[in-house]
Amino acid sequence: MTAISCKALCRTFQQGEVKITGLDQVTIDIDDGEFVCLSGPSGSGKTTLLNAMGGLDTPDSGQITVNSQRIDHLSKGEMADMRLHKIGFVFQAYNLIPVLTAQENIEFVMQVQGVPATKRHIKSLEVLKEVGLEGAADRLPSQLSGGQQQRVAVARAIVSKPTLILADEPTANLDTKTASQLMDLFVELNRHHKITFVISTHDQRIMTYARRLIKMQDGKIISDEKLSSAIQ
Amino acid sequence: MQTPIKTITILAWRNLWRNYRRTFIMLAAITVGAWAMIFMTALMRGMVDEMIKDGIRSLPGHVQIHHPLYRDDPSITNSLSAPSKQLLTALKQDDVIAWSTRVRVPAVISSERDSRGIILVGIDPVAERSITNTADNISEGRFLTDKLDNGLVIGAALAKRLDTQPGKRVVVMSQDPDNEIADRGFRIVGLYQATIEAMEENTIYAARDTVQKLLKMGDQISEVVILGKDYRDVSTLTENIKSAAANDTEVLPWQELDTYLGTMLKVMDGFVFVWIVVIFLALSFGLANTLIMAVFERVREIGLMQALGMRPSGILYQFMLEAFFLLTIGLGIGNIAAVASIKPLESGIDLSVVAEGMAMMGAGSTLYPALYISDIILANIIVIILGLLTSLVPAWRASRYDPVEAITKT
């Protein structure tokens, strides 16, 4: 079944008097449980495509369907609800809420979803254990290392069991060892929870984890290939 | 899906203390503002209260009954019969503290040196002591003792103008019911002082029965004066008296009897409102600035929360709640500080250095701050409502950020 489907997506940005093409007629289908890497140089359109898929940005034209639901016409509020229930985000710069502890950051999405407190606590502790941070529940983001913060961000993204996780350069700020550990975690989550991953990167080592590699350039998909040699 | 209030509350509360220096500065501003609003209002209320109470205690009382034409023509022809049984029953109710009957007519007073037009007031000296403060303000001689007292009490200023003094005789002249001159000699037994000099110059007191005899009016009277419990709330008392008084009488509260005092109270109420709003306007710039800074500092977080599924309304409520916390804490401390600073001053602030100026305004030389719960509530409600309206602009701005732009903001 298709997790996300994009048809003829176009997106342009105005920078002063210059018009920049972010996406140019991008069409792509990603099935449930896939582990996809979007690669390409800076400005190739990876982040723009991820933002459009996640409903953070609205394309100028084209259609986006997430779990059979058209999202390109939704209002801001409906878009927020869709992100809340269906999509998990992992950003390059960790992006945790600084005034909440690690556990509270993980619980944040469930809180907004209205999950009862007891269930939230149990689930957040389970997920913290799963990402290897069981002892860091009460620490604020400022008391965690970069790698730990990114793990908390991953835990937050997976805790409400989304069908899709969009990760924008998740390892860009991590050292090689931590980046490998994070990718191992992604692979494991993909394998065990059948969560679909779409990861944008221009790091060659990260691409070796992908089972499908989509290359972009100037807002267009220039290649889309299935890989059998992915690290699993 | 609406963000649960608990989530918003936690975020708002913790964000408030994130930049604690800025929060403390803003709290200090709100505290000082709230203190100034309440403290200054209490001082102004105290001054106006004294002026009104003094004014009421100088003659009008809280409610009066007259002949319907008496106010236009305060002559002996527009007089009333003594209170009926029904009225006497009403005057015995709990909401009546004291009452008395008076004869009040225009007259002329002559000493051996001068003559002046005055108001002759025939009073029951015993009952009058509970209603007016003239008996307490005798500067020389004595006050009247009973209804049959033959003496006369005049204002100190009038005595000066007539070049007379206690012990001397004066002649008081008025008209009887047949429009004939009625006059008699009185010995001045006392001089009184009033806050308003005009009162001292134009009002003289004699015993009611003596005046009734002089004017040949039997037991007719000019007015019934009634003192209730609270000068601010006389509407019920007025209605009760109205329903018990005869139909051909006019029952009026003090605000209508003395429009100057009534207007002063209304002006004071308006002034308190304007004063609170003006102080708030000064505060609002600081509040708006604090919230705008908070929004600028947290643009990325706002984008992140939106990306994670928080609706724009959740962001809006979060900033509004932050403003609400600031306002309530600041107001709370300000209220406590105001009460704490007013309480020790309740025994009076000595303003004798500016006594002359105060007297010109009709106020005494001691200022008694008057702290009303209604003023505190009004100040708090105005600040919270206007504060939330002020915070609406930065909060709205925060909620309208585009998540992609916000999250990539550096």
Image (cartoon, coloured by chain):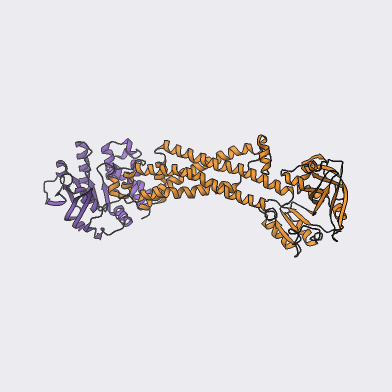
Chain colours: A purple, B orange
The vertical placement of A214 against A144, above or below, is below
Picture mark count: 0
Q: Is residue A228 left or right of residue B148?
A: left
Q: Which quadrant would the C terminus of chain B be assigned to in this image?
A: top left
Residue B116 percent location from the top left of the image: 80, 48
Q: Is residue B148 left or right of residue A211?
A: right
Using the image as rendered, state which of residue A87 and residue B264 is in the foreground. B264
Residue at 87% x, 58% y: name it: B216
The vertical placement of B256 against B297, above or below, is below
Q: Is residue B135 left or right of residue B36?
A: right
The residue lying furthest to the front in this view is B113
Residue B91 percent location from the top left of the image: 76, 56
Q: Which quadrant would the N terminus of chain B be assigned to in this image?
A: bottom left
Residue at 76% x, 45% y: name it: B200
Residue B388 percent location from the top left of the image: 45, 49
Residue B133 visible to an observer of this rendering? no
Using the image as rendered, state which of residue B165 and residue B269 is in the foreground. B165
Using the image as rendered, state which of residue B91 and residue A175 is in the foreground. B91
Quadrant for residue B77, please give it.
bottom right
Residue A70 visible to an observer of this rendering? yes
Residue A17 percent location from the top left of the image: 21, 49
The residue lying furthest to the bottom in this view is B247
